[in-house]
Image (cartoon, grey):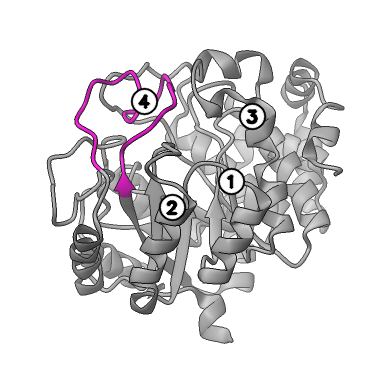
Amino acid sequence: MHTFKNIFELHNWEEQKISIYSKTAKDVEHAISSKKRTLEDFKALISPAAVTYIEQMAQASHALTQKRFGKTIQMYAPLYLSNECNNICTYCGFSFDNKIKRKTLTDAELLKEVEVLKNNGFNHILLVTGEANKTVHIDYFKKAIALIKSQFANISIEVQPLETEEYKELHEVGVYSVLVYQETYHEEVYKNYHPKGKKSNFFYRMETPDRIGTAGIHKIGLGILLGLEDWRTDSFFNALHLDYLQKKYWQTKFSVSFPRMRPAEGIIEPNVIVSDKDLVQLICAYRLFNEDIELSISTRESEKFRNNIIPLGVTSMSAGSKTNPGGYAVEPTSLEQFEISDERSAQEISNLISEAGYEAVWKDWDNVLQ
């Protein structure tokens, strides 16, 4: 099977980094003025040369987003089913070597969590787990989805990479979207961040979106963990991956998320600091590169940043999030995957969106339109 690995191996990390950092003001101006932007244009838009053009990029990003998505922001909430994990990941609070209390929700506990989320207005949910194949596996996911399917218009998942047949099973029981982040595309250092567990297999993880696409899942979510490696180079590889997937699975929708490293129990400090200005530049660059992708910002980000990002290209936001299993109702003190920065309630975020002249959409707009 031809997968992204074939494309990836044609691109050397250091060569791409040099290419990005050597882009000029002229390259940036060409990228901004182009009607059909290429990966070379994307490199220019994320380059240091584009820093002085962020205002122009923001205006163009705003116009493109409004044209494609209208003045809407989709609301979603993560529901953590389990913090059990067999991987050692140096940046994650759920890491196997963290000696913390582990918890996987029972059916009754899951329904209590759902009740809180429904009372808060959510109709779009993201189910999240650590990677513990003996505990949170395909049968556990199918059972959880069967329990809550009638409660939500839209169910997304962010779990361990699965096989194509397993994704087909999840598609059949109602999973709309699957999120899988490569964390970093820097193959040489990937093992340093993932020394133990199935996640240490760089290419198996990287080929996961191919398996999701083959299974016919409606939407695939990509992303890198901002702070691990040079954000510009990593983002180029993520865009390269996106470009490949869109051409191959052209009936599938795509989203990109922008998680920045946040404090968590027992984790490393960021290797690279990604400033608010850097993140604005990156979000606008993605929108100019691809007007159809959904761009998502979570509660990892500060209140101030999320207040100001609404008009700049983002299409979905989480709100009132808890990143620990049972965090909404069952066991609020269980270990978080990372600390939340924006702790405002879902209603407060909805009000913020309204005050910005936008509409908060509580279920997926694709389903609304069908």
Farthest bottom residue in view: 370
The residue that label 1 is drawn on is 162
Which residue does the image show at 56% across and 21% down from the upper left?
229
First in sequence: mark 1 vs mark 2: 1
The residue that label 3 is drawn on is 234
In the foreground, 279 or 340? 340
Q: Secondary structure at mark 4?
A: loop
Q: Secondary structure at mark 3?
A: helix
Which residue does the image show at 78% across and 52% down from the upper left?
33
Looking at the rendered structure, the kind of residue marked 3 is Asp
Q: Which secondary structure type mostly characterizes the magenta part of the structure?
A: loop
In the foreground, 45 or 228? 228
Which residue does the image show at 40% across and 54% down from the upper left?
140
- In the rendered image of this protein, does residue 321 appear above or below residue 184? below
Which residue does the image show at 43% across and 52% down from the upper left?
309
Looking at the rendered structure, the kind of residue marked 2 is Ile
The residue that label 4 is drawn on is 95
Looking at the rendered structure, the kind of residue marked 1 is Leu
Q: Nearer the viewer, mark 3 or mark 1?
A: 1
Cα distance in 3D space between marks 4 and 2: 31 Å
First in sequence: mark 4 vs mark 1: 4
- In the rendered image of this protein, does residue 367 appear above or below residue 211? below
Number of marks present in the image shown: 4
